[in-house]
Image: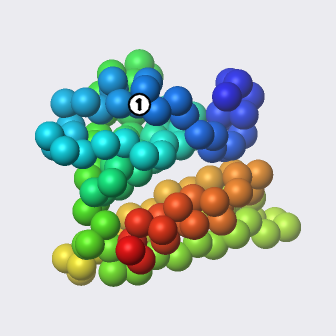
Amino acid sequence: MGLFDGLMGNASEVNLSVIESEVKDLLSKNERVEQAYKLIRDLFVFTDKRLLLIDKQGMTGKKTEYHSIPYKSVVHFSVETAGTFDFEAELKIWLSNGSDPIEKKFNKTLNIYKIQSVLADYVLK
């Protein structure tokens, strides 16, 4: 993925061996990375057991938040496509703990249906 694509909000699939080395300390003994998408510096990592949302923060990206969501705790999720004057697509994920939904925004050039389809495959197993 080029820098321009990242700045425009285009998510792209990431090489799994690169992601596995980055998240190896977060994975359980029998857990494996199955798919991953990168959006600028943030990552959506789908393992066989959970969704990892990785948010690199700050100017250098050294500060990182790892949000772990077991698929069984996803109550529902929604996608909102970008419109003519609304330039962002949005993914919302509600969890069983009743907290506010997790919200992620994407440039309208992203195929939000692809991310939703992958999430549905894991949540609806």
Q: Quadrant where the C terminus lies?
A: bottom left
Residue 8 seen anywhere in this rendered image of the structure = yes
Residue 49 horizontal/vertical position (percent): 28, 57
Q: Is residue 47 left or right of residue 12?
A: left
Residue 53 seen anywhere in this rendered image of the structure = no
Name the residue located 32 percent from the left edge and 73 percent from the top edge. Answer: 74
Q: Residue furthest right?
A: 84
Q: Quadrant where the N terminus lies?
A: top right
Name the residue located 31 percent from the left edge and 43 percent from the top edge. Answer: 32
Check disc 1: other Cα within 10 Å, few if <14, some if 14-19, many if 20+. Answer: some
Q: Is residue 10 left or right of residue 100?
A: right
Name the residue located 76 percent from the left edge and 51 percent from the top edge. Answer: 109
Q: How is the image coloured?
A: rainbow
- Which residue was labeled with disc 1? 19
Q: Is residue 83 left or right of residue 96?
A: right
In terms of secondary structure, where does tag 1 sit?
helix
Of 74 and 8, the residue lying toward us: 74
Q: Residue furthest left?
A: 29
Residue 38 horizontal/vertical position (percent): 54, 38
* Amino acid type of the residue tagged 1 in the rendering: Ile
Of 31 and 106, the residue lying toward us: 31
Q: Residue furthest top?
A: 60
